[in-house]
Amino acid sequence: MVIDKRMGENDARKILFRVDGGRIRGVSLGHVFRCMTLAGELKERYQFDVTFLMKNYEEGVKVVKRRGFEAKVLNCNIDHNQEIDIIERFNGNLIVFDVIDVMEKGIGRLLGNGKQIVAIDDTGNKRIDADVVINGSIVPEFRLYLKNGKNTCYYLGPKYCILGEEFDSFQSRETKPKVETVLVFMGGSDPVGLTLRVAKYFSASSFSHKLVIILGPGFEGQDKVKDCLRTYRGMYYLLEAPPKVFTKFAEADIAILAGGRTAYEAARMGVPSIIIPSIKHEEIVAKAFSDSGAFLALPLGESLPENKFCFLLHNAMEKLLENRHMREQMSKAAGKLVDGRGRNRVIHILLKSLKKR
Protein backbone atom coordinates (compact mmCIF):
# COMPACT_ATOMS: atom_id res chain seq x y z
CA MET A 1 0.00 0.00 0.00
CA VAL A 2 1.16 3.51 -0.80
CA ILE A 3 0.62 5.97 2.04
CA ASP A 4 1.47 9.63 1.98
CA LYS A 5 2.57 11.51 5.10
CA ARG A 6 -0.88 12.87 5.78
CA MET A 7 -2.05 9.38 6.81
CA GLY A 8 -0.09 9.86 10.01
CA GLU A 9 -0.99 13.49 10.74
CA ASN A 10 -3.57 14.60 13.26
CA ASP A 11 -6.16 16.24 11.07
CA ALA A 12 -9.26 17.31 12.95
CA ARG A 13 -11.35 17.30 9.77
CA LYS A 14 -10.25 14.06 8.17
CA ILE A 15 -12.52 11.10 7.47
CA LEU A 16 -11.57 7.67 6.17
CA PHE A 17 -13.98 5.46 4.21
CA ARG A 18 -12.94 1.80 4.23
CA VAL A 19 -14.93 0.23 1.39
CA ASP A 20 -14.51 -2.34 -1.38
CA GLY A 21 -16.27 -2.76 -4.70
CA GLY A 22 -15.66 -4.25 -8.10
CA ARG A 23 -16.65 -6.90 -10.59
CA ILE A 24 -16.36 -9.48 -7.82
CA ARG A 25 -19.20 -11.74 -6.77
CA GLY A 26 -20.57 -10.48 -3.46
CA VAL A 27 -18.51 -7.26 -3.54
CA SER A 28 -20.79 -4.97 -5.50
CA LEU A 29 -20.13 -1.38 -6.51
CA GLY A 30 -23.22 -0.38 -4.52
CA HIS A 31 -21.08 -0.12 -1.39
CA VAL A 32 -18.74 2.28 -3.18
CA PHE A 33 -21.55 4.47 -4.54
CA ARG A 34 -23.15 4.60 -1.11
CA CYS A 35 -19.92 5.83 0.47
CA MET A 36 -19.29 8.34 -2.32
CA THR A 37 -22.76 9.76 -1.73
CA LEU A 38 -21.85 10.47 1.89
CA ALA A 39 -18.29 11.52 1.13
CA GLY A 40 -19.37 14.00 -1.52
CA GLU A 41 -21.64 15.87 0.85
CA LEU A 42 -19.13 15.80 3.71
CA LYS A 43 -16.44 17.15 1.42
CA GLU A 44 -18.42 19.74 -0.53
CA ARG A 45 -20.90 20.97 2.06
CA TYR A 46 -18.89 20.56 5.27
CA GLN A 47 -15.32 20.83 3.89
CA PHE A 48 -14.04 17.57 5.38
CA ASP A 49 -10.89 15.95 4.03
CA VAL A 50 -12.05 12.58 2.73
CA THR A 51 -9.86 9.57 1.93
CA PHE A 52 -10.93 6.16 0.61
CA LEU A 53 -9.06 3.01 1.61
CA MET A 54 -9.88 0.11 -0.71
CA LYS A 55 -8.70 -3.30 -1.79
CA ASN A 56 -7.22 -3.02 -5.24
CA TYR A 57 -10.28 -4.12 -7.24
CA GLU A 58 -9.82 -2.12 -10.42
CA GLU A 59 -13.44 -1.11 -11.10
CA GLY A 60 -14.10 0.25 -7.61
CA VAL A 61 -10.86 2.21 -7.35
CA LYS A 62 -11.42 3.74 -10.81
CA VAL A 63 -14.93 4.89 -9.89
CA VAL A 64 -13.69 6.62 -6.74
CA LYS A 65 -10.79 8.37 -8.47
CA ARG A 66 -12.97 9.49 -11.37
CA ARG A 67 -15.28 11.15 -8.85
CA GLY A 68 -12.30 13.17 -7.61
CA PHE A 69 -11.65 11.42 -4.31
CA GLU A 70 -8.31 10.31 -2.97
CA ALA A 71 -8.06 6.50 -2.95
CA LYS A 72 -5.38 4.49 -1.15
CA VAL A 73 -5.17 0.83 -2.16
CA LEU A 74 -4.60 -2.37 -0.22
CA ASN A 75 -3.38 -5.70 -1.51
CA CYS A 76 -6.46 -7.83 -2.19
CA ASN A 77 -5.05 -10.62 -0.01
CA ILE A 78 -4.00 -8.47 2.92
CA ASP A 79 -4.30 -9.98 6.39
CA HIS A 80 -7.00 -8.40 8.60
CA ASN A 81 -4.50 -7.59 11.34
CA GLN A 82 -2.21 -5.84 8.86
CA GLU A 83 -5.18 -3.89 7.57
CA ILE A 84 -6.13 -2.69 11.04
CA ASP A 85 -2.49 -1.77 11.69
CA ILE A 86 -2.64 0.53 8.66
CA ILE A 87 -5.95 2.05 9.71
CA GLU A 88 -4.64 2.70 13.24
CA ARG A 89 -2.05 5.04 11.73
CA PHE A 90 -4.87 7.19 10.37
CA ASN A 91 -5.32 10.02 12.89
CA GLY A 92 -8.52 11.56 11.59
CA ASN A 93 -11.76 11.87 13.50
CA LEU A 94 -13.92 9.26 11.86
CA ILE A 95 -13.57 5.89 10.14
CA VAL A 96 -16.55 4.54 8.18
CA PHE A 97 -16.52 0.84 7.28
CA ASP A 98 -18.74 -0.41 4.45
CA VAL A 99 -17.35 -3.88 3.76
CA ILE A 100 -19.13 -7.23 3.73
CA ASP A 101 -16.69 -8.91 6.13
CA VAL A 102 -16.72 -6.10 8.69
CA MET A 103 -17.35 -8.52 11.58
CA GLU A 104 -14.16 -10.43 10.74
CA LYS A 105 -11.86 -7.43 10.62
CA GLY A 106 -11.34 -6.98 14.34
CA ILE A 107 -12.37 -3.33 14.17
CA GLY A 108 -12.98 -3.43 17.94
CA ARG A 109 -9.25 -2.76 18.25
CA LEU A 110 -9.94 0.74 17.00
CA LEU A 111 -12.48 1.61 19.70
CA GLY A 112 -11.43 3.88 22.53
CA ASN A 113 -8.41 5.33 20.72
CA GLY A 114 -9.97 8.72 20.02
CA LYS A 115 -11.58 7.74 16.72
CA GLN A 116 -15.27 7.24 16.09
CA ILE A 117 -15.98 3.96 14.29
CA VAL A 118 -19.09 3.70 12.10
CA ALA A 119 -20.12 0.50 10.31
CA ILE A 120 -22.60 0.50 7.43
CA ASP A 121 -24.09 -2.97 7.05
CA ASP A 122 -26.82 -4.73 5.05
CA THR A 123 -27.38 -8.23 6.42
CA GLY A 124 -27.08 -8.15 10.24
CA ASN A 125 -26.95 -11.38 12.25
CA LYS A 126 -23.43 -10.70 13.43
CA ARG A 127 -21.53 -8.91 16.16
CA ILE A 128 -20.06 -5.58 15.09
CA ASP A 129 -17.80 -3.73 17.53
CA ALA A 130 -18.35 -0.12 16.53
CA ASP A 131 -19.58 3.14 18.01
CA VAL A 132 -22.37 3.29 15.44
CA VAL A 133 -24.02 0.69 13.20
CA ILE A 134 -26.22 1.85 10.31
CA ASN A 135 -28.38 -0.61 8.38
CA GLY A 136 -30.97 0.59 5.85
CA SER A 137 -32.30 -2.84 4.88
CA ILE A 138 -35.97 -3.47 4.23
CA VAL A 139 -35.59 -7.00 5.67
CA PRO A 140 -36.44 -7.25 9.41
CA GLU A 141 -34.26 -10.32 10.01
CA PHE A 142 -31.31 -8.50 8.43
CA ARG A 143 -31.56 -5.83 11.13
CA LEU A 144 -30.78 -8.16 14.06
CA TYR A 145 -27.38 -8.02 15.78
CA LEU A 146 -25.53 -10.09 18.34
CA LYS A 147 -24.76 -8.29 21.60
CA ASN A 148 -21.26 -6.86 21.74
CA GLY A 149 -21.10 -5.49 25.28
CA LYS A 150 -20.38 -2.00 23.94
CA ASN A 151 -22.37 1.22 23.97
CA THR A 152 -23.10 0.89 20.27
CA CYS A 153 -25.82 3.05 18.74
CA TYR A 154 -27.93 1.25 16.10
CA TYR A 155 -29.83 3.05 13.35
CA LEU A 156 -31.92 0.46 11.53
CA GLY A 157 -34.48 0.30 8.73
CA PRO A 158 -35.09 1.80 5.28
CA LYS A 159 -35.35 5.30 6.74
CA TYR A 160 -31.54 5.08 6.81
CA CYS A 161 -31.25 3.90 3.21
CA ILE A 162 -28.57 6.08 1.59
CA LEU A 163 -29.49 7.43 -1.85
CA GLY A 164 -28.07 10.33 -3.83
CA GLU A 165 -29.43 13.85 -3.44
CA GLU A 166 -31.12 13.61 -6.85
CA PHE A 167 -33.67 11.31 -5.18
CA ASP A 168 -34.58 13.92 -2.54
CA SER A 169 -37.24 15.87 -4.38
CA PHE A 170 -39.20 13.19 -6.24
CA GLN A 171 -42.86 13.28 -5.18
CA SER A 172 -45.09 10.99 -7.23
CA ARG A 173 -45.50 9.40 -10.66
CA GLU A 174 -48.32 8.81 -13.10
CA THR A 175 -49.22 5.23 -13.98
CA LYS A 176 -49.82 5.28 -17.72
CA PRO A 177 -52.60 3.18 -19.28
CA LYS A 178 -49.98 1.29 -21.28
CA VAL A 179 -46.34 0.53 -20.62
CA GLU A 180 -44.08 2.42 -23.00
CA THR A 181 -40.58 2.18 -21.47
CA VAL A 182 -38.90 -0.76 -19.76
CA LEU A 183 -35.71 -0.10 -17.79
CA VAL A 184 -33.11 -2.83 -17.14
CA PHE A 185 -30.37 -2.15 -14.59
CA MET A 186 -28.40 -4.91 -12.86
CA GLY A 187 -26.13 -2.74 -10.76
CA GLY A 188 -22.66 -1.34 -11.14
CA SER A 189 -20.89 -4.44 -12.45
CA ASP A 190 -23.32 -7.39 -12.83
CA PRO A 191 -20.70 -10.12 -12.28
CA VAL A 192 -23.20 -12.97 -12.82
CA GLY A 193 -24.36 -11.77 -16.26
CA LEU A 194 -28.04 -11.02 -15.65
CA THR A 195 -28.04 -8.13 -18.13
CA LEU A 196 -27.14 -10.44 -20.99
CA ARG A 197 -29.73 -13.02 -19.94
CA VAL A 198 -32.46 -10.36 -19.91
CA ALA A 199 -31.29 -9.02 -23.28
CA LYS A 200 -31.51 -12.53 -24.76
CA TYR A 201 -35.04 -12.84 -23.42
CA PHE A 202 -36.16 -9.59 -25.06
CA SER A 203 -34.42 -10.35 -28.35
CA ALA A 204 -36.45 -13.58 -28.64
CA SER A 205 -39.72 -12.04 -27.44
CA SER A 206 -42.56 -10.39 -29.34
CA PHE A 207 -42.31 -7.18 -27.28
CA SER A 208 -41.58 -3.88 -28.97
CA HIS A 209 -41.52 -1.49 -26.01
CA LYS A 210 -38.78 1.10 -25.69
CA LEU A 211 -36.01 -0.76 -23.87
CA VAL A 212 -33.43 1.17 -21.84
CA ILE A 213 -30.53 -0.91 -20.53
CA ILE A 214 -28.11 0.74 -18.12
CA LEU A 215 -24.61 -0.72 -17.93
CA GLY A 216 -22.81 0.24 -14.75
CA PRO A 217 -19.22 1.55 -14.67
CA GLY A 218 -17.86 -1.91 -13.80
CA PHE A 219 -19.80 -3.78 -16.49
CA GLU A 220 -17.95 -5.93 -19.02
CA GLY A 221 -19.46 -7.43 -22.17
CA GLN A 222 -21.15 -4.43 -23.79
CA ASP A 223 -20.60 -5.84 -27.28
CA LYS A 224 -22.31 -9.13 -26.40
CA VAL A 225 -25.38 -7.29 -25.14
CA LYS A 226 -25.44 -5.07 -28.22
CA ASP A 227 -25.13 -8.03 -30.60
CA CYS A 228 -27.88 -9.88 -28.77
CA LEU A 229 -30.32 -6.97 -29.12
CA ARG A 230 -29.96 -6.64 -32.89
CA THR A 231 -33.04 -8.84 -33.33
CA TYR A 232 -35.17 -6.95 -30.79
CA ARG A 233 -38.39 -5.67 -32.40
CA GLY A 234 -38.49 -2.32 -30.65
CA MET A 235 -36.17 0.62 -30.00
CA TYR A 236 -33.43 -0.01 -27.48
CA TYR A 237 -30.79 2.13 -25.81
CA LEU A 238 -27.60 0.93 -24.14
CA LEU A 239 -26.42 3.56 -21.67
CA GLU A 240 -22.94 3.10 -20.25
CA ALA A 241 -22.69 4.61 -16.75
CA PRO A 242 -25.05 7.55 -17.42
CA PRO A 243 -24.45 10.49 -15.08
CA LYS A 244 -28.13 10.84 -14.09
CA VAL A 245 -29.67 7.43 -13.40
CA PHE A 246 -32.45 9.24 -11.56
CA THR A 247 -33.93 10.56 -14.82
CA LYS A 248 -34.02 7.06 -16.32
CA PHE A 249 -36.02 5.77 -13.37
CA ALA A 250 -38.37 8.74 -13.73
CA GLU A 251 -38.99 7.89 -17.41
CA ALA A 252 -39.51 4.14 -16.89
CA ASP A 253 -42.95 2.57 -16.62
CA ILE A 254 -41.57 -0.71 -15.27
CA ALA A 255 -38.06 -1.91 -14.39
CA ILE A 256 -36.12 -5.17 -14.21
CA LEU A 257 -33.45 -5.00 -11.53
CA ALA A 258 -31.05 -6.91 -9.33
CA GLY A 259 -31.72 -6.83 -5.58
CA GLY A 260 -29.12 -4.33 -4.43
CA ARG A 261 -29.02 -0.55 -4.30
CA THR A 262 -30.98 -0.21 -7.55
CA ALA A 263 -34.02 -1.84 -5.97
CA TYR A 264 -34.13 0.83 -3.27
CA GLU A 265 -33.74 3.56 -5.91
CA ALA A 266 -36.64 2.11 -7.88
CA ALA A 267 -38.75 1.94 -4.71
CA ARG A 268 -38.04 5.58 -3.97
CA MET A 269 -39.19 6.44 -7.49
CA GLY A 270 -42.29 4.25 -7.24
CA VAL A 271 -41.32 2.20 -10.31
CA PRO A 272 -43.19 -1.15 -10.50
CA SER A 273 -40.32 -3.60 -10.83
CA ILE A 274 -39.25 -7.19 -11.27
CA ILE A 275 -36.31 -8.15 -9.05
CA ILE A 276 -33.93 -10.87 -10.19
CA PRO A 277 -31.54 -11.58 -7.31
CA SER A 278 -27.87 -11.82 -8.25
CA ILE A 279 -26.63 -13.30 -4.97
CA LYS A 280 -28.21 -15.44 -2.26
CA HIS A 281 -29.03 -12.73 0.30
CA GLU A 282 -30.78 -10.71 -2.43
CA GLU A 283 -33.42 -13.44 -2.63
CA ILE A 284 -34.50 -12.46 0.87
CA VAL A 285 -34.47 -8.78 -0.09
CA ALA A 286 -36.54 -9.56 -3.20
CA LYS A 287 -39.07 -11.49 -1.11
CA ALA A 288 -39.40 -8.58 1.34
CA PHE A 289 -40.12 -6.17 -1.52
CA SER A 290 -42.58 -8.66 -3.00
CA ASP A 291 -44.33 -9.21 0.35
CA SER A 292 -44.77 -5.44 0.69
CA GLY A 293 -46.64 -5.38 -2.62
CA ALA A 294 -44.01 -3.15 -4.24
CA PHE A 295 -42.26 -5.52 -6.66
CA LEU A 296 -42.48 -8.93 -8.25
CA ALA A 297 -39.63 -11.29 -7.40
CA LEU A 298 -37.90 -14.10 -9.28
CA PRO A 299 -35.63 -16.74 -7.73
CA LEU A 300 -31.85 -16.37 -7.80
CA GLY A 301 -31.18 -15.61 -11.47
CA GLU A 302 -27.90 -17.45 -11.78
CA SER A 303 -29.43 -20.70 -10.53
CA LEU A 304 -32.18 -20.81 -13.17
CA PRO A 305 -31.74 -22.72 -16.44
CA GLU A 306 -32.39 -20.58 -19.51
CA ASN A 307 -35.88 -21.91 -20.26
CA LYS A 308 -37.03 -21.49 -16.65
CA PHE A 309 -35.50 -18.01 -16.46
CA CYS A 310 -37.35 -16.89 -19.60
CA PHE A 311 -40.60 -18.53 -18.48
CA LEU A 312 -40.64 -16.80 -15.09
CA LEU A 313 -39.56 -13.45 -16.48
CA HIS A 314 -42.21 -13.64 -19.20
CA ASN A 315 -44.96 -14.40 -16.67
CA ALA A 316 -43.92 -11.43 -14.54
CA MET A 317 -43.76 -9.15 -17.58
CA GLU A 318 -47.23 -10.20 -18.71
CA LYS A 319 -48.68 -9.48 -15.28
CA LEU A 320 -47.32 -5.94 -15.28
CA LEU A 321 -48.08 -5.15 -18.90
CA GLU A 322 -51.70 -6.27 -18.74
CA ASN A 323 -52.72 -4.75 -15.41
CA ARG A 324 -52.57 -0.99 -14.96
CA HIS A 325 -54.25 -1.22 -11.56
CA MET A 326 -51.60 -3.64 -10.37
CA ARG A 327 -48.83 -1.31 -11.52
CA GLU A 328 -50.52 1.62 -9.81
CA GLN A 329 -50.84 -0.26 -6.50
CA MET A 330 -47.24 -1.46 -6.71
CA SER A 331 -46.06 2.08 -7.34
CA LYS A 332 -47.86 3.36 -4.25
CA ALA A 333 -46.55 0.51 -2.10
CA ALA A 334 -42.98 1.06 -3.29
CA GLY A 335 -43.12 4.79 -2.61
CA LYS A 336 -44.02 4.15 1.03
CA LEU A 337 -40.91 2.05 1.69
CA VAL A 338 -38.11 4.53 1.00
CA ASP A 339 -38.61 8.25 1.60
CA GLY A 340 -35.32 9.44 0.07
CA ARG A 341 -34.14 11.26 3.21
CA GLY A 342 -31.87 8.51 4.51
CA ARG A 343 -28.72 10.28 3.33
CA ASN A 344 -29.58 13.38 5.38
CA ARG A 345 -30.24 11.26 8.45
CA VAL A 346 -26.95 9.40 8.09
CA ILE A 347 -24.97 12.61 7.51
CA HIS A 348 -26.48 13.95 10.74
CA ILE A 349 -25.41 10.76 12.54
CA LEU A 350 -21.85 11.09 11.22
CA LEU A 351 -21.62 14.74 12.25
CA LYS A 352 -22.95 13.85 15.69
CA SER A 353 -20.32 11.11 15.96
CA LEU A 354 -17.60 13.61 15.10
CA LYS A 355 -18.71 15.90 17.92
CA LYS A 356 -18.32 13.05 20.41
CA ARG A 357 -14.64 12.73 19.73
Image (cartoon, rainbow, N blue to C red):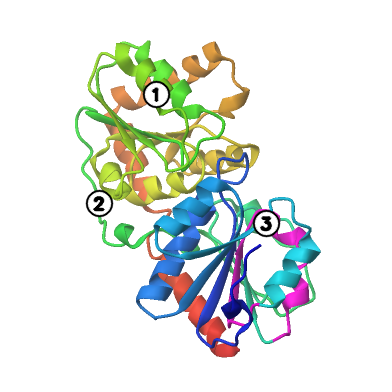
Comparing labels 2 and 3, the label whose residue is closer to the camera: 3
The answer to whether residue 89 is seen in the rendering is: yes
Label 1 or label 2, whichever comes before in sequence order: 2
SS of the residue under disc 1: helix
Q: Which residue is mark 1?
A: 223
Give the quarter of the figure containing the C terminus. Answer: bottom right
Q: Which residue is mark 2?
A: 172
Which label number is shown at residue 75? none
Q: Is residue 322 left or right of residue 356?
A: left
| 234, above or below 213, in the image | above
Q: Which residue is mark 3?
A: 124
Structural distance between the alpha carbons of marks 1 and 2: 36 Å
Q: Residue 225: where, in percent of width, then height?
A: 40, 23
Label 1 or label 3, whichever comes before in sequence order: 3
Quarter occupied by residue 118? bottom right
Label 2 or label 3, whichever comes before in sequence order: 3
**What range of the chain is rendered magenta?**
90-113
Structural distance between the alpha carbons of marks 1 and 3: 38 Å
